[in-house]
Structures are given as structure tokens and as C-alpha cells.
Amino acid sequence: MEKGDVTVILIILILLVGYLIWRIQRWLDGTGTRRRRIPRHSDIPQDDVVELLESAGFHVLAGKTKIPITMTINQREQLESRLFIDYFVQKEEDIYLVKVAKERKPLEMTGSSVRDMLLPYSLIYPEAAGILYVDMTLNKIKKITFTIEVQA
């Protein structure tokens, strides 16, 4: 083997080791990457909802967050809408989305009603551990999780 061959082999090995280190770091940061999608706001209102969440051991990460949605019909007509998440909170390592009960649109605790009202949020943020439904008239927090079984 000549000196040039050894140099080429060393360069290839260095590049291979560098690539492997980079891939391992990306793999280890996988959970952090998912968490980066969760917004963090400094302007969190200090209201009764925040007090209830904090007294239950949750740390409020963000206040009201707007999620714009654009829908295209027949590749021509565009419709726009939005969803709002009232708060993002964390307890230990788990992140939760928070929806506050609205007087004009109460949530019936039936499977279809909970699905229709809250499942879209769970699908947008699958990394969340669940959705907290806060009812301030009852001073209650309900933790809702979804398990979806897809049958082939």
C-alpha cells in the first residue's frame, strides 16, 4: 500500500465516523425535535385557569395559540379556517394541550362529542401526552387521551 492509499482510507474513515456521530446525535435529539414544535410564550395570562393548572402541578408553557388551516377543494378553491389551543402545559416530562370549556359550546362527555371536538388537536400534536379539558364552573381538569386502532 502506498502513502496516497493510506491518506484516502483515513479520509474515508474520518468522514464515516463523522457521519455516524452526526446520525447518533440526530437520533438522540429525536425527542427534543418533537418538543420544539410546542410553542413557548412569555406572555402567559395570569388568570383563574392558569392558577388551577399550576395548583394541579402543571407548568404553563404557552397561552392561546392559533393554528391556521388551509383546505383546497378540487385543486382550485381554497378555504381557510383555524383552530385554537388555549394553553400548552407540562407536568414532569409530559406535554399536554389545554382546552377550556366554553359556555356557548359545552362538551358532552360522549365518545362522539369528545372525538369531534378534541381529536383534531391530538392529531396535530401527536407528541402530546393528552388533552386537558378545563371546566372552570366546576373547577375541574379532565385528562383525555386517544388510542386509535387502525384495522387493515
Image (spheres, helix red, strand yellow):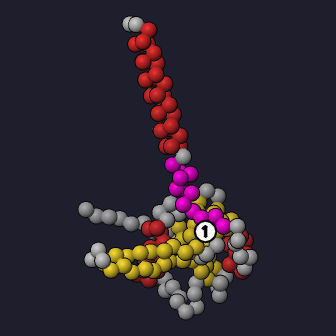
Figure check: 111 above or below 30: below
Of all residues, the one furthest to the bottom in this rendering is 104
Residue picked out by circle 1: 88
Is 120 or 4 nearer to us in this picture? 4
Q: Position of residue 104 (x, y in %)?
A: 55, 92
Residue shown at the point (44%, 68%) measured from the top left: 123
Residue at 44% across, 8% down:
3
Q: Which residues are magenta?
A: 30-41
Q: Return the x and y of residue 129 as percentages of the image width and height.
A: 53, 63
Is residue 106 rendered to the left or right of residue 140? left
Q: Residue type at mark 1: give it.
A: Phe
At horizontal 54% and vertical 60% (from top left) the residue drawn is 37
Within the image, what quadrant is residue 72 found in?
A: bottom left
User: Does the stretch in magenta take in 107?
Assistant: no
Residue at the far left in the pictured view: 152
**In the structure shown, which secondary structural element does the residue marked by tag 1 occupy?**
strand
The structure residue drawn at horizontal position 61% and vertical position 83%, both measured from the top left corner, is 135
Q: Is residue 138 left or right of residue 33?
A: right
Q: Residues within 10 Å of mark 1 (few under 14, many from 20)?
A: many
Q: Position of residue 55 (x, y in %)?
A: 73, 71
